Amino acid sequence: MQTQISFIIKTCFFHIRRIASIRRYLTLDACVKLVVSLIFSRLDYCNSLLAGLPASCIHGLQRVQNAAARLTLRKTKRDHITPLLRSLHWLPVNTPISYKLSTLVYKCLNDSAPSRSGALRL
């Protein structure tokens, strides 16, 4: 998984640098939409597979989210990140992972999970 996480981090920072080059021309709302569509889509894709990994693996993804928040709100590295994430209504990276896993378990326990009849049979 470390290879996959490294690739996600590298790709996200590439997009952050690209957005940073045009940030002065964007409104806050446009920048938020751009960051959510380009970066959060990558952070959230199959994030339930990241459950149970060491915090050192998840830390890199949290760095991506922190950099995206600082870029969006035009803040420096010295600014505390928690108020920035709260003002954007963004949860820390490990919270959506836990939420998705909890939702899957709840659906399985309450018989609302997708049936296997639609799955491919080999």
Image (spheres, grey):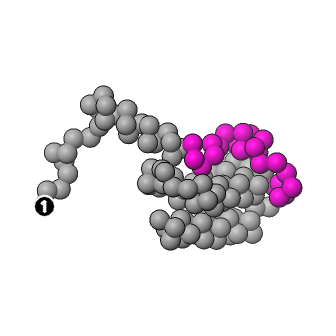
Find the magenta span and give its range: 74-95
Q: Is residue 14 visible?
A: yes
Q: Residue at x 19, y 45 (%)?
A: 116
Q: Residue at x 49, y 39 (%)?
A: 99
In this view, 41 is above or below 97: below
* Residue furthest top in the image: 110
Q: Is residue 37 visible?
A: no
Q: Would you say 115 lies left or right of 92 here?
A: left
In this view, 72 is above or below 85: below
The foreground one among 16 and 115 is 115
Q: Say which element carries label 1.
A: loop
Q: Would you say 108 lies left or right of 75 here?
A: left
> Is 80 within the magenta?
yes
**Around disc 1, counting alpha carbons within 10 Å, would you say few (fewer than 14), some (14 to 19), or many (20 or more)?**
few
Q: Residue at x 21, y 41 (%)?
A: 115
**Residue 122 falls in image quadrant:** bottom left
* Picture coordinates of residue 113, whole percent (x, y): 29, 37
> Is 109 within the magenta?
no
Q: Would you say 55 lies left or right of 23 here?
A: left
Q: Amino acid at mark 1?
A: Leu
The foreground one among 91 and 73 is 91
Check disc 1 and report the residue beneath it.
Answer: 122
* Picture coordinates of residue 89, whole percent (x, y): 67, 39
Q: How many marks?
A: 1
* Residue furthest left in the image: 122
Q: Would you say 70 lies left or right of 39 here?
A: right
* Picture coordinates of residue 27, whole percent (x, y): 75, 52
* Picture coordinates of residue 98, whole percent (x, y): 50, 42
The foreground one among 113 and 2 is 2
